[in-house]
Image (cartoon, rainbow, N blue to C red):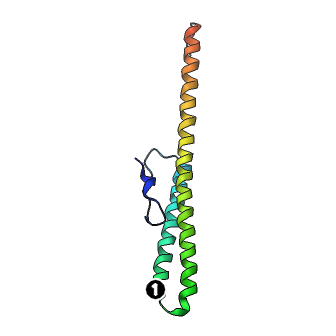
Amino acid sequence: MMFWQTTTAEAGWGGSPGPGWGSASGRLLSCEQELLGVRADLVASAQAWVSPAGKAFRERLYEYRTKMAESAELLRWAAVALEAVDAAIDAADAAADVAKAAEAALHGRTP
């Protein structure tokens, strides 16, 4: 499941993490959801300001929206990277267990 692909500055809400995601990467994904929620609120606020006096304010809101969308995307990629590291650690642990069992079997011992 590749749910992170929908998260861009224009895509809006990203997907939910799958059940296999660790707690740290899940927290990062929750932060992404919060950032995208604030971004949506900023978009709505910017559209509500239609007077010429609000032009500078709207421009600032758009800048913040872009920065938040970029931050949310970076958080998403950090969560993906963290999940990959967790998977690599699990694979290394499993390989070490297999190596110990093979060594024990080679010497006629039980692991």
Horizontal and vertical percent for residue 56? 58, 85
Q: Is residue 16 visible?
A: no
Q: How many marks?
A: 1
Q: Residue at x 53, y 38 (%)?
A: 87
In what element is the residue under mark 1?
Answer: helix
Q: Quadrant of residue 44?
A: bottom left
Q: Residue at x 49, y 81 (%)?
A: 45
Amino acid at dot 1: Ala
Label 1 environment density (alpha carbons within 10 Å; few <14, some 14–19, many ≥20): few
Q: Is residue 82 above or below residue 47?
A: above
Q: Residue furthest left?
A: 1
Horizontal and vertical percent for residue 3? 42, 52
In the image shown, does 72 or 31 lie closer to the viewer?
72
Q: Is residue 91 visible?
A: yes
Q: Quadrant of residue 66?
A: bottom right
Q: Is residue 33 above or below residue 65?
A: above
Q: Which residue is mark 1?
A: 48
Q: Residue at x 55, y 25 (%)?
A: 95
Q: Residue at x 51, y 59 (%)?
A: 30
Q: Is residue 37 above or below residue 4?
A: below
In the image shown, does 35 or 60 lie closer to the viewer?
60
User: Which quadrant is the C terminus positioned in?
Assistant: top right
In the image shown, does 12 or 89 lie closer to the viewer?
12
Horizontal and vertical percent for residue 82? 57, 46
Horizontal and vertical percent for residue 88? 55, 36
